[in-house]
Amino acid sequence: MRWILPIIIGFFCGCVQPIDHDNEQASVSKSTSAKLFTAYSNQENAYQNFDGPKAINKLAAIENEHFNALEKGYSRYYGTEWRTIAENLLLENGQNRFEEYQTGLGHPPDSLHCTLYAYEGLKAGLDSTQLTKLERLHHKIWKNREIAGWSLGYLLVKHFDWNAYLVINPKSVEYKKCLKAYQQRKVYPVWRQPEIPLEALYVQGKDDSLVTSLLQKHQFGWGFSEQGIHTWVTRFEVLKECNWLGVPSKKYTESYDKPLFVATKFDQFADYHSHVIVFPPLLGR
């Protein structure tokens, strides 16, 4: 996977839990034979210039399609890094594993990794004018480089009136640097890139109740960890992520059984020690 981060990218690892259904009432599935793995939102939108329920439901639709397809055999969604591994695994019939998957699927597949997954939700919540503006601004600053959690986070704050918050553990290698940057300039410092203005800095273990209260107000949040090593979204108190090693068929879980889509309570997410969450402006703010 090609990244635009000018840092060493760490190996992705997520907390394995079933997709969280939140506390929202599930909508009726379009297919009577389909199972509901992720609940859809039936809440009214609470944001200015962003459709939170539409963003959440786009991701819910992807997850439900994927997990229902796994029950039958093959999903069109696969993790980008899984493909790299699968293409290097030769089978007795002369095919590699990815070719076997394509044959079994029977139609074009879709590659996903953490940022692409999160971006599907973000795009769904923006109208066409806003999306065009976002992509134009990204190209103006970073040319043809791929989007990243931090690059879109910066644009959402600077040009779309979103609000960013830093949640950091004292164990983080960037704790002192981030604390100093916040005290001096109220920003999150991204290495050799534009700094992201912050509304607040919360220290894990000290400000947990404040973080929970903040998350409870927001159906959708755009987030990234440790300079952008990993991108994700939040749905209230749940962190939702895509695992780039996720497999598109249960027949491939013998070697790797972490699902493509994972949901974890934010206060239980411990893979990284610093997190920036960016929220759309609330109505009536």
Image (spheres, grey):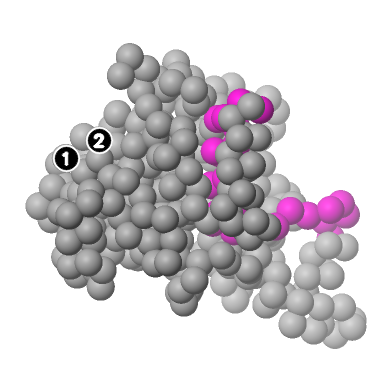
Other-residue count near label 1 (Cα within 10 Å), few / some / many at <14 / 14–19 / ≥20: few
Residue 267 visible to the viewer:
no
Taking the spot 18% from the left edge, 67% from the top edge, the residue there is 176
Measure the C-alpha gap from mark 1 to mark 2. 6 Å
Question: Residue 197: x and y, percent?
Answer: 32, 46
Total of numbered circles in the picture? 2
Q: Is residue 154 rendered to the left or right of residue 261?
A: left
Taking the spot 18% from the left edge, 49% from the top edge, the residue there is 202
Q: Is residue 216 above or below residue 232?
A: above
Q: Is residue 55 above or below residue 103?
A: above
- Callout 2: SS: helix
- Callout 1: SS: helix
Main SS of residues in magenta? helix
Question: Is 158 part of what is drawn in magenta?
Answer: no
* Quadrant housing residue 127: top right
Taking the spot 16% from the left edge, 40% from the top edge, the residue there is 210
Question: Residue 131: x and y, percent?
Answer: 62, 34
Q: Nearer the viewer, residue 211 or 79?
A: 211
Q: Three-letter amino acid code at disc 2?
A: Leu
Q: Is residue 132 above or below residue 250?
A: above
Taking the spot 83% from the left edge, 62% from the top edge, the residue there is 102
Q: Is residue 11 rendered to the left or right of residue 247?
A: left
Mark 1 and mark 2 residues within 8 Å of each other at the beta carbon: yes
Q: Three-letter amino acid code at disc 1?
A: Leu
Other-residue count near label 2 (Cα within 10 Å), few / some / many at <14 / 14–19 / ≥20: some
Q: Nearer the viewer, residue 181 or 11?
A: 181
Q: Which residues are magenta?
A: 104-128
Question: Residue 54: x and y, percent?
Answer: 55, 27
Q: Which residue is mark 1?
A: 210
Q: Quadrant of the C terminus?
A: top left
Question: Residue 265: x and y, percent?
Answer: 32, 48
Q: Which residue is mark 2?
A: 214
